[in-house]
Image (cartoon, rainbow, N blue to C red):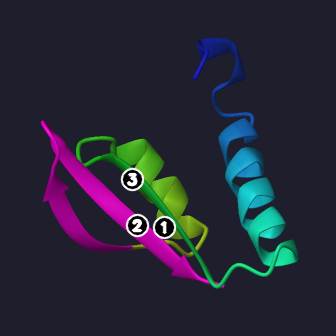
Amino acid sequence: MLPEVRRQRVGRQLVQFAIDRAIEKGCRSIDLNTNERNIGAIALYQQLGLRAERSLWHGGRQLWLEKAL
């Protein structure tokens, strides 16, 4: 994310929009992944209700997070 938009809740708004859109479309869950070292992103995703279910190796440590809708 660009430094000038950090701490302005842009990331939160984007993720929340994706969650809301998935609900509107009738999705039963939403999943995403991030590097396990991306502590800021993980904290944001967890605040929005996503939970880490497993860690998988894909050329780097990727943490998969899921949320039932």
With 50 as the anchor, is 54 left or right in this view?
left
- Going by the image, does 38 lie left or right of 59? right
Q: CA distance from mark 1 to mark 2?
A: 8 Å
Q: Nearer the viewer, residue 59 or 49?
A: 59
Which residue range is magenta in the image? 52-69
- Where 6 falls versus 69 (above or below)? above
- Three-letter code for the amino acid on which mark 2 is drawn: Leu
> Residue at the location (68% across, 53% down)?
15
- Is disc 1 surrounded by few (<14), some (14 to 19) or many (20+) residues within 10 Å? some
Residue 41, image x, y percentages = 46, 46
Q: Which mark is residue 64?
A: none
Which residue: 56% across, 67% down? Answer: 47
Q: Earlier in the sequence, mark 1 or mark 3?
A: 3
- Residue 17 point in image, percent of width and height: 80, 56
Residue linked to disc 3: 33
Q: Position of residue 68 (x, y in %)?
A: 57, 85
Disc 1 target residue? 46
Q: Are marks 1 and 2 in contact (CB under 8 Å)?
A: yes
Q: Magenta span has 55? A: yes
Q: Is residue 32 magenta?
A: no
Magenta stretch, main secondary structure class: strand
Instruction: Give, as a three-letter code, the residue at label 1.
Output: Gln
**Circle nearer the viewer, 1 or 2:** 2
* Three-letter residue code for mark 3: Asn
Of the image marks 1 and 2, the number of the one nearer the N terminus: 1
Q: Which disc, if any, is residue 65?
A: 2
The mark lying in front, picked from 1 and 3, is: 3
Cα gap from disc 2 to disc 3, whole angstroms = 6 Å
